[in-house]
Amino acid sequence: MLESIKQCKRCNLYKNQNPLLDQLKVCDIMWVGLSAKKVEDIEKDMPLAIRTNSGGIIAEIESRCEKVLTYKTNLVKCLPLDENEKLRYPNTSEINTCFSNLIKEIDLLKPKIIFLLGTQVTAAVKRNLKVKFEKDEDSDLKIGKYKGVELIAVYHPSYVCSYRRKYKECYIEQISNIINARMLY
């Protein structure tokens, strides 16, 4: 099923770089970022790689959650570049065009929790899935449901690295505590 995502050509972003996907596996947790970054080898690299600021924070969270299987993805699987070949934010049309690929991943992998990284990802999920998010009393995060899967909106890790450095440890601890509290081993 993910083979169809690897072959996707519904927009022109594939000309910049083919879809970047994690390795197929069953997962407990799915991390959803905004868009792909430039990689050397599309077959060996993955979204939210540990060498990135965001991937490093996610790896730290995962290291505190034993036996939890994770899958990393982006709303937009290909690389959005501007006219100067610089990474840019994907536009609404690109997000909407690629959104069905996220649904395929969710349906195939059946995660228990999906962390939506940042306001743009959360807004796209709200818009495309018509999900209502409510403030969680325990964590102060916004939580929704889709097909029985808990959707949790959090700050994007790169935002935490850039603008909330003092909050980084608290961010890591909060999310790892949420995962550990919700996972049944």
Image (spheres, rainbow, N blue to C red):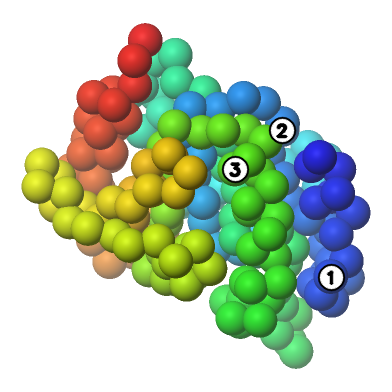
Quickly name the residue at label 2.
23
Callout 3: 10 Å neighbours few (<14), some, many (20+)?
Answer: some
Q: Mark 1 points at which residue?
A: 10
Determine which quarter of the picture holds residue 108: top right
| Earlier sequence position, callout 3 versus callout 2 | 2
Pinpoint residue 23: horizontal percent, then vertical percent: 71, 33
Quadrant where the image shows the C terminus:
top left
146 and 159: which is toward the camera: 146
Residue 107: numbered disc: none
Count of numbered circles in the view: 3
Q: Mark 3 highlights which residue?
A: 106
Above or below: residue 11 compared with residue 64: below
Residue 168 rendering spot, x and y as whole percentages: 25, 48
Q: Do the residues labelled 1 and 2 touch (CB within 8 Å)?
A: no
Q: Is mark 3 on a helix, strand or loop?
A: helix
Instruction: Write the residue at 42% across / 54% down.
Output: 116
